[in-house]
Image: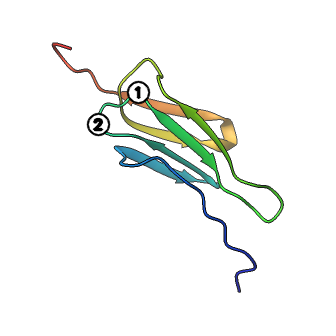
């Protein structure tokens, strides 16, 4: 039985996302510079969110490991831009 339901707002369309160990990360659109990381709420902690609008690279994909505080990126190289 659920004791509570929480809604967490996330950015619109995404290129890549990952859900691992209570952390949901998403990047907007193809080759976006944006990354949003949301720690999902628990019975003892509210949700928290970190947004980075410009990481200095165009994200094609990524992987996260919250237990090691690690994010690994695959950057998209767009020729002629």
Q: Which residue is farthest right? A: 44
- Residue ID at (53%, 54%): 19
- Report which quarter residue 76 is drawn in: top left
Asked if residue 67 lies left or right of residue 79, the reply is right
Residue 43 pos. (x, y %): 80, 66
- Residue 33's disc is 1
Task: Describe the element under mark 1 as helix, strand or loop.
Answer: loop
Q: Which residue is farthest left? A: 80
- Residue 52's disc is none
Give the image's coloring scheme.
rainbow
Q: Which residue is farthest bottom? A: 1
- Residue ID at (48%, 49%): 18
Residue 6 pos. (x, y %): 66, 66
| Residue designated by label 2 | 30
The local crowd at label 1, few if under 14, some if 14 to 19, many if 20 or more residues have their Cα within 10 Å, is some
For the C terminus, the quadrant is top left
């Amino acid at each position: 039985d659920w004791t509570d339901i929480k809604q967490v707002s996330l950015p619109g369309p995404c290129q890549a996302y990952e859900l691992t160990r209570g952390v949901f990360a998403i990047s907007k659109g193809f080759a976006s510079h944006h990354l949003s990381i949301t720690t999902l709420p628990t019975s003892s902690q509210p949700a928290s969110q970190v947004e980075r609008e410009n990481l200095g690279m165009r994200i094609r994909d990524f992987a996260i490991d919250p237990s090691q505080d690690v994010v690994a990126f695959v950057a998209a190289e767009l020729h002629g831009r």
